[in-house]
Image (spheres, grey):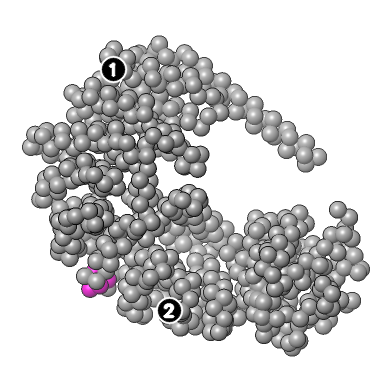
């Protein structure tokens, strides 16, 4: 496109960002983001110039459109803003300079001077007003100001380190001008502005620029002011702020900790699930903070009932899946190579992973405060992971993976690891009451109680141990409950006690071990896909602990696993591969018997031949073969050559594809 045409479009776009019609603003944002991706911000300095000046106007809405534009191209915006120099007079076309005219000229000049080191807008030569669609100069109104704040929020969300960086030709970092203005907007009568301003400041808690550190008291005062805001989105951001502060800046909250804890207890019961979810994150964060646990202990009698109440399925959480229905592509989660991890989509799989991520993030924050690149990389990776956890499935008919129920279970898990058996006197009477509830209407309470037992299975094991035989004896019949979700959660909770179930078999005989093993095998052939998944994952966990205890039962185990192999849809079939591989690792050479080979290998080889080299389902099958080959030793020799040759072929094909891609990239650059 000719340069003159580009400049004309840019000139017409800025007024569209402030249009009353939201669709026009959104479309303008899309076009603006395209320009930014192609030419960068340095080629359009007027865009950022407008964002800076409008913050000091008396208007409210320009932000929404600008945020739409900048947040759509975070990678390119970051690259270009890092080297951005606000030389407003620089231009390649004498007629292309664009400026937004403001009614509050003094405030605009002051803001410009603060950001540019004294180079005010009035000093710019040959400035011209932005043409609007038939209306002359653009005068920001309430919508204009809101759009500007939204734009700045887009930058704060996507590339916050940009504003907290030294930029050529600026006397100070841009964030020093933005943070005080955001804090002032906490008191705005406009809910949208309060939300945008708080969201922008929250993005800097982990980075903690100097200007926010010295303004911490004012920031906290603003949070307390907004704590009872009538707008749920604002209350959610208040909770998010407290969670971030307790994670990485707990010292700032210590003087107010009692009041904050009281507030979180109340908001954890908020009618808005998103607000309650954000508040619930506080308890896990508290447990990880370097704060005396005793500060929280007095709140446990009130907190634990709230968590158990929130762990029950809500009406729209019910998902009774028919095992005969084919999996859709979106049902298949992305697969990442890792050590063997028996993961269903149940709560604890996410708890374990989130624990590891949060620990890594905390360490990086502690040890890399002066290394912004390392710190920001950790924060970005963690936020990307949490986004994947929260929105694993994006279809409207699939409940987000991370919800209040799972967050509450995670909080209970953290609390049990911090307080141990001290939570049992308060918790167990509630659990027992829920387990004793009868009638169809109480099944969700029973399910939540079983989930609670699993959540505390690690942290409270010393207190539970004397009663473990009774607990397991109670759980085994639930494997045959008429409600699929009770069957599935019972599988998972039993897997939490796998180590002790196997130890009990060594000491007290195999009766209880046999009941658990056969119960899980029955659930492997369940008609419900969620139960299949939970049972197969739980059985794989039991396999690891049982090892040689499985040898006398190999025949019945292989019968059930190979039946599942023939019945399961694609998603759960991957867990069968894992269970088969774990079985091979557990029993080793005991698997190398003709009758077991006859049961195991023909179906696997048939599947191996059916899958193309580019089929993603081939990867878990390859991992399964790896374990089986190691276990069988020479018994795998009859299958070794074709498997080996195909692996070599796949490697060569992938290398060829990489080489071709490299050539195409080089050709494109030339």
Q: Earlier in the sequence, mark 2 or mark 1?
A: 2
> What main secondary structure does the magenta stretch of the protein show?
helix
Q: Position of residue 42 (x, y in %)?
A: 77, 63
Q: Position of residue 75 (x, y in %)?
A: 65, 55
Q: Position of residue 323 (x, y in %)?
A: 37, 36
Please tell me which residue is depicted at 37% across the width and 54% down the height of the picture.
317
Please tell me which residue is depicted at 37% across the width and 43% down the height of the picture.
321
Q: Which residue is mark 1?
A: 596
Please tell me which residue is depicted at 37% across the width and 48% down the height of the picture.
319
Q: Is residue 603 magenta?
A: no
Q: Which residue is mark 2?
A: 227
Q: Is residue 299 magenta?
A: yes
Please tell me which residue is depicted at 44% across the width and 54% down the height of the picture.
400
- Magenta stretch: give its range: 296-300
Which residue sits furthest front?
A: 440
The answer to which of 17 and 157 lies nearer the viewer is: 17
> Alpha-carbon neighbours of circle 2 within 10 Å: few (<14), some, or many (≥20)?
some
């Amino acid at each position: 496109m000719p340069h003159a045409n580009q400049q004309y479009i840019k000139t017409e776009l800025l007024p569209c960002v402030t249009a009353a019609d939201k669709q026009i603003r959104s479309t303008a944002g899309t076009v603006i983001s395209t320009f930014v991706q192609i030419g960068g911000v340095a080629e359009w300095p007027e865009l950022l110039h407008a964002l800076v000046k409008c913050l000091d106007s008396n208007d409210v809405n320009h932000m929404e459109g600008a945020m739409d534009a900048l947040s759509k191209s975070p990678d390119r915006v970051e690259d270009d803003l890092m080297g951005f120099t606000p030389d407003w007079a620089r231009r390649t076309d004498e007629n292309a300079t664009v400026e937004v005219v403001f009614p509050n000229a003094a405030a605009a000049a002051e803001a410009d001077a603060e950001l540019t080191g004294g180079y005010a807008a009035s000093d710019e030569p040959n400035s011209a007003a932005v043409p609007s669609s038939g209306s002359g100069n653009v005068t920001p109104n309430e919508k204009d100001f809101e759009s500007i704040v939204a734009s700045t929020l887009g930058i704060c969300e996507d590339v916050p380190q940009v504003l907290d960086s030294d930029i050529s030709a600026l006397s100070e970092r841009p964030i020093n001008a933005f943070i005080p203005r955001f804090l002032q907007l906490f008191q705005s009568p406009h809910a949208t502005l309060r939300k945008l301003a708080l969201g922008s400041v929250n993005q800097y808690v982990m980075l903690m620029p100097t200007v926010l550190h010295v303004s911490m008291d004012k920031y906290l005062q603003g949070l307390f002011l907004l704590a009872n805001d009538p707008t749920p989105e604002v209350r959610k951001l208040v909770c998010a702020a407290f969670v971030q502060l307790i994670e990485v800046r707990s010292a700032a909250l210590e003087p107010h900790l009692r009041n904050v804890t009281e507030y979180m207890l109340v908001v954890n019961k908020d009618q808005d699930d998103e607000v309650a979810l954000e508040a619930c994150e506080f308890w896990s964060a508290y447990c990880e903070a370097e704060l005396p646990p005793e500060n929280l202990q007095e709140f446990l009698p009130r907190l634990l009932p709230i968590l158990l109440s929130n762990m029950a399925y809500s009406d729209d959480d019910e998902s009774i899946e028919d095992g005969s229905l084919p999996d859709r592509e979106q049902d298949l989660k992305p697969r990442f190579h890792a050590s063997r991890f028996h993961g269903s989509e149940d709560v604890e799989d996410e708890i374990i992973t989130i624990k590891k991520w949060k620990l890594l993030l905390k360490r990086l924050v502690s040890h890399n405060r002066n290394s912004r690149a390392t710190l920001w990389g950790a924060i970005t990776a963690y936020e990307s992971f949490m986004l994947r956890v929260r929105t694993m499935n994006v279809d409207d008919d699939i409940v987000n993976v991370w919800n209040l129920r799972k967050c509450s279970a995670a909080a209970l898990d953290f609390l049990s690891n911090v307080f141990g058996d001290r939570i049992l006197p308060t918790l167990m009477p509630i659990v027992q009451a829920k387990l004793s509830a009868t009638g169809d209407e109480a099944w969700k309470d029973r399910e939540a109680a079983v989930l609670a037992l699993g959540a505390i299975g690690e942290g409270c094991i010393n207190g539970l141990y004397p009663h473990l035989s009774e607990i397991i004896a109670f759980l085994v019949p639930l494997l045959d409950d008429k409600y699929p979700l009770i069957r599935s959660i019972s599988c998972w909770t039993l897997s939490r006690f796998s180590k002790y179930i196997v130890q009990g078999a060594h000491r007290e005989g195999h009766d209880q071990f046999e009941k658990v093993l056969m119960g899980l095998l029955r659930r492997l052939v369940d008609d419900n896909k969620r139960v299949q998944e939970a049972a197969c994952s739980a059985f794989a966990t039991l396999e690891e602990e049982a090892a040689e205890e499985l040898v006398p039962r190999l025949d019945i185990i292989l019968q059930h696993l190979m039946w599942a192999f023939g019945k399961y849809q694609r998603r759960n079939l991957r867990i069968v591969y894992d269970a088969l591989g774990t079985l091979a690792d557990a029993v080793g050479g005991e698997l190398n018997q003709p009758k077991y080979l006859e049961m195991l290998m023909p179906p696997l080889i048939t599947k191996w031949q059916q899958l193309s080299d580019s089929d993603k389902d081939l990867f878990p099958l390859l991992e399964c073969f790896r374990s089986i080959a190691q276990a069988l030793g020479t018994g795998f020799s009859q299958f070794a050559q074709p498997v080996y040759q195909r692996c070599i072929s796949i490697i060569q094909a992938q290398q060829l594809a990489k080489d071709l891609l490299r050539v195409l990239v080089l050709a494109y650059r030339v």
